[in-house]
Image (spheres, rainbow, N blue to C red):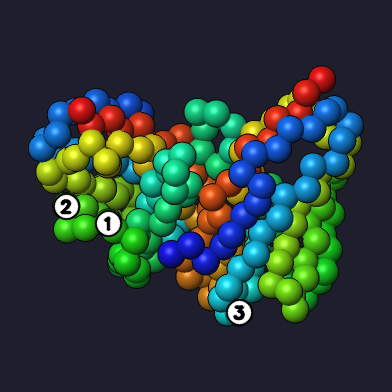
Amino acid sequence: DAGVIQSPRHEVTEMGQEVTLRCKPISGHNSLFWYRQTMMRGLELLIYFNNNVPIDDSGMPEDRFSAKMPNASFSTLKIQPSEPRDSAVYFCAAGQFANTGELFFGEGSRLTVL
Amino acid sequence: QQQVKQSPQSLIVQKGGIPIINCAYENTAFDYFPWYQQFPGKGPALLIAIRPDVSEKKEGRFTISFNKSAKQFSLHIMDSQPGDSATYFCAASTQAGTALIFGKGTTLSVSS
């Protein structure tokens, strides 16, 4: 299995533009998490899904952020409009979390907002 | 959301030393405590995990010590090697599989 696949790996955009980050989890993994990593704040949980249903989005910074999981094999994280303070590495992680406790992380999407 | 506090922020040891990274949690409902290891440019990966029914777990050179009454747990790396240089994150969640909350991470550098 190829693991958790994220795209794009790098994104540079200008303030005000819409950004869409994508994640393809490992087949059979029914939990999917989105995290944001910065030097100052570490790994912050943004939102997580179980069986494609959003369970907790209390970590989403504000209404500019939205996430969807239309099916078991795909999720998106959208920022509209983007701001410089959104610059970070965004990770998608998936697993059979309730059963095994283990999450498998993708390699991340590094976002730079100018 | 900072329910898991990790220290130190960075750590430098010589090859063969025993770095120790500490974490403290607040939520008594937490009952699953993993450690993740992250290399530059990569996502974190599970290293070792413990549940509160034991006070210590060892896997190879990595050991977790757990103190339920103090709500603290720590990672010890025996005979550390330059290849152990990475960022280490402690985390916590409930057995029901709710959100996995991470500490802020510790950057470990092992010099040869």
What residue is pinned by disc 3? B28
**In 3D space, how far apart are the residues under numbered discs 2 and 3 (Cα atoms)?**
33 Å
Judging from the image, what secondary structure is the residue with disc 2 in? Answer: loop
- Same-subunit check for callouts 2 and 3: no
A20 and B2: which is toward the camera: B2
What residue is pinned by disc 2? A64
Q: Is B92 on the left or on the right of B11, as rendered?
A: left
Q: If the image is split into quadrants, where does the C terminus of chain A sit? A: top left
- Same-subunit check for callouts 2 and 1: yes
Q: Is A83 on the left or on the right of A46, as rendered?
A: left
User: Are dots 2 and 1 in contact, CB under 8 Å?
Assistant: yes
Subunit that carries the residue with mark 1: A
- At label 3, counting other C-alpha atoms closer than 10 Å, the crowd grade (few under 14, some 14-19, many 20 or more) is few
In the picture, the disc for residue A61 is 1
Q: Is residue A87 above or below residue B8?
A: above
**In 3D space, how far apart are the residues under numbered discs 2 and 1 (Cα atoms)?**
8 Å
